[in-house]
Image (tube, rainbow, N blue to C red):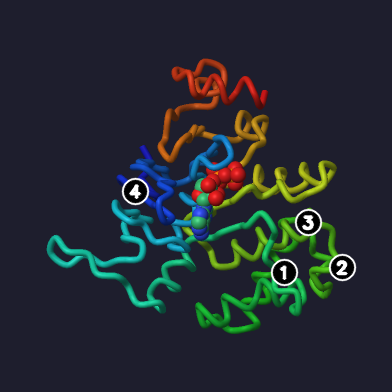
Amino acid sequence: MSQVMVDVHGVHKSFGPLKVLRGVDLQVRAGEVTVILGPSGSGKSTLLRTINHLEKVDSGWIGVDGDLIGYRRSGDRLHELKEKDVLKQRTHIGFVFQNFHLFPHLTVLDNLVEAPVSALRRPRKEAEETARRLLARVGLADKADAYPRQLSGGQQQRVAIARALALEPKVLLFDEPTSALDPELVGEVLDVIKDLAGSGTTMIVVTHEIGFAREVADTVVFMDGGVVVEQGPPAAVLDDPRHERTRTFLAKVL
Ligand SMILES: Nc1ncnc2c1ncn2[C@@H]1O[C@H](COP(=O)(O)OP(=O)(O)OP(=O)(O)O)[C@@H](O)[C@H]1O
């Protein structure tokens, strides 16, 4: 069995009085695709954001490829990492946002080149070669010199995926990658994610696209009320859920 790439252990997170994560445990194996489903407000985005330390956990811990995220252990105490060390950890954890978050003032090519050059100190020529290869992979080789505003939403999201890949992440996190898109553009983005799944990229995808979950996920996780209610292969969770809460959710969305 492949190694555990992402290990979420007893994670709690509140915003003021609102308890959003109430003890989340989740393990994602290298090369596998985990799709997280759940009602609005169940804590899916917050969980993703704790994995790359955009949100700090209140308690519990998260490991990515054996590294504790945001902290270092000394004996049985945890010490917060410095910002520069957090940023370094984040280069291993790609994040694709709902609204693309491309740099509007940079060309498509420079969106992909910026982080490898500034964060990983890659030579610019090498970073550009990688960027062009990745743009070809997402079907946008001819858009290298365009600016984000000149692209459709689907194209922008494909650039965002290529940009995340340019840092050669150990895991790619997707937060509702198609929910800001016009319906006719959803398929082109899901096809890129499917292609990555086929090549063994470790991914955690928060989405409401049940068909995608069925087709692509190795594991479907159902979250509700800040906990993982159930998880398993798509056929088990989607067609034969064990929990009433999962059944109620699926009855609404299927
Ligand atoms: N930074 C924040 N400050 C205060 N409350 C927050 C913050 N981030 C999230 N929340 C709240 O936490 C709850 C869970 O939000 P989260 O975005 O994780 O849920 P979700 O399951 O991803 O929902 P959706 O499917 O609607 O995106 C919501 O009530 C949200 O308003």
Please name the amino acid that badge 2 sits on.
Gln
Q: Is residue 135 left or right of residue 31?
A: right
Foreground mark, 2 or 1?
2
Q: Point out which mark residue 11 bears.
A: 4
Mark 3–mark 2 distance (CA, rounded to whole Å):
16 Å
Q: Is residue 40 in view from this perspective?
A: yes
Which structural element holds mark 2?
A: helix
- SS at mark 4 in the image: strand
Disc 4 residue lies near ligand 1 with CB under 8 A: no
Reading the chain from its start, which is encountered first: label 3 or label 2? Answer: 3
Which mark's residue is nearer the viewer, 4 or 2? 4
Measuring from the top left, give residue 186's x and y in whole percent: 77, 44
For mark 3, does the 10 Å Cα neighbourhood hold few (<14), some (14 to 19), or many (20 or more) residues? some
Which residue bears the numbered disc 1?
132
* Residue under pointer 3: 139
Please tell me whether mark 4 or mark 3 is closer to you in this view: 4
Amino acid residing under circle 1: Arg
Q: What's the amino acid at mark 4? A: Val
The residue tagged 2 is 150
Query: Could you tell which of marks 4 and 2 lies nearer the N-terminus?
Result: 4
Write the residue at 65% across / 47% down.
193
Q: Nearer the viewer, residue 216 or 78?
A: 78
Pointer 4 local density, CA inside 10 Å: few below 14, some 14–19, many at least 20: many
The CA distance from mark 4 to mark 2 is 41 Å
Quadrant where the C terminus is found in the figure? top right
Q: Tell me the element at label 3.
A: loop
